[in-house]
Image: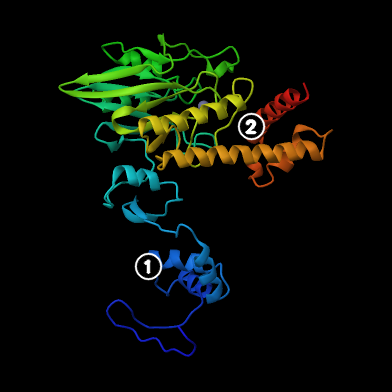
Amino acid sequence: MPEGQSPVADEAEQFEPVWVRPAEALARHQVGGFFIIFPTIRTLQRLEAYQTVDDVLKACASEQPLWTSCPRAGLLAGKEARYMESDAPYGELALTCPDGQIVHPLDWQTAQPVKLLKNVMRLTAPNPGMMTGPGTNSYLVGEADSGYIVIDPGPNDAGHIQRLFEATGGRIEAIVCTHSHPDHSPAARPLQALCVGHPPILGLASAATARPDAQFTPDRSLSNQELLTLSGKGLEHNLRVILTPGHAANHLCLVLLEDGLLFSGDHILNGSTTVVSPPDGEMTAYLTSLDLLSAACDEHQIDFILPAHGYVLGAAKQAIAHLKAHRLKREAKVAAAMKAKPQGTMNDWLALAYDDTDPRLWPVALRSLQAHVDRIRVMQAGFSA
Ligand SMILES: [Zn+2]
């Protein structure tokens, strides 16, 4: 508007017209007493970055493609909670409520399974923590008429195992472990023992490099690209196995072909970064496996990633690209730290390369730092050879 305008409200959707700067409006909203609806808040948050109207117009003139957003809402403690594309629960809402219904509960709870699709449930184990986020997600793929495959039965927790059994009515056809870590595989044997049909435990045996608490031997080893099929009464669900070493030497992912879903285990998480801990974890293998998963997104039209920790991720291929960029950016910081302090210790490099990370996470970050250092040294040796 030109200078000197007086706003007049239509008294239907607008009341109390007032000129106010974006930052001030947001501040007044924050302390209460200045009601603004969600889209206006988000718009003001974008405008806040600019000093003048001209700056805004200039920024818009070069923005290609123009920014668009379709927020989604779910329920937290029974109340509506709204999320942008960049927020952690967004993908889960896109999967469960594609038409925008506000019905999906986002509260983490372990008492009962959460329905994600008619043939996919998630039951979270009661083991929340710094390394496990809200807890380990066990996934139940299938229906009563086809039987179920349990992906990642979780830690050896009697209550959780009992709930997995009950949620499937005991009709478990196979138990698959994405890898052998103690929050993923120890429930496999006790769950198998509960089932009358003695369903096979499938996965890859832990490697010689696995820690003592991550030992695992499946009843049968899965091979790359193997297909696991559930069928019954005209239903069919097919899971394709993709071997993905990196987070652990015996890590694998599964693609539910009919629904375009990727069960990513710990290779891709929502809300935290995967730890790559040598020697069982290996950074080059981790990045190569990410590329394999990206290719699988194209091949199988995968839209959603169901991680072992955190909500469902949407925009699968972009999420993988983002993750790879994050890893390579971290690697560049590690390489710069090694260059800046050639005689430095791991802790010197840690402080430089993870200066943007909460120091409480540093003991864990040290493991991924080691993986980056190993990879950088191998690459340097390659160049000088
Ligand atoms: Zn793990």
Snapshot quadrant of residue 306: top left
Residue at disc 2, CB closer than 8 Å to ligand 1: no
Residue 361 seen in this snapshot: no
Q: Position of residue 81 (x, y in %)?
A: 37, 55
To which residue does mark 2 refer? 368
Residue 202, position in %: x, y?
A: 39, 15
Question: What's the residue at 40%, 18% (across, down)?
Answer: 225
Cα–Cα gap, marks 2 and 1: 42 Å
Residue type, label 1: Ile
The dot on residue 192 is: none
Secondary structure under badge 2? helix
Model colouring: rainbow
Q: Along the horizontal axis of the image, is 328 left or right of 90? A: right
Residue 191 image point, x, y percent: 35, 18
- Tell me what residue is drawn at x 29 percent, y 15 percent: 195
Left or right: 163, with 381 as reference point: left
Q: Residues within 10 Å of mark 2 (few under 14, many from 20)?
A: many
Image quadrant occupied by the C terminus: top right
Does the image show residue 155? Answer: yes
Q: Residue 293, percent across and down?
A: 46, 30
Front residue (pair 155, 66):
66
| Type of amino acid under label 2 | Ser
At numbered mark 1, what does the secondary structure look like: helix, strand or loop? loop
Extreme residue toward the right, this view: 343
> Could you classify mark 1 by the number of other residues whose Cα lies within 10 Å: few (under 14), some (14-19), or many (20 or more)?
few
Q: Residue furthest left?
A: 233
Q: Earlier in the sequence, mark 2 or mark 1?
A: 1
- Please identify the quadrant where the N terminus is shown: bottom left
**Rendered view: 333 above or below 250:** below
Ligand 1: does it lie within 8 Å of the C-beta at label 1? no
Residue under label 1? 37
Which residue is rendered at x = 44% and y = 66% of the image? Answer: 43
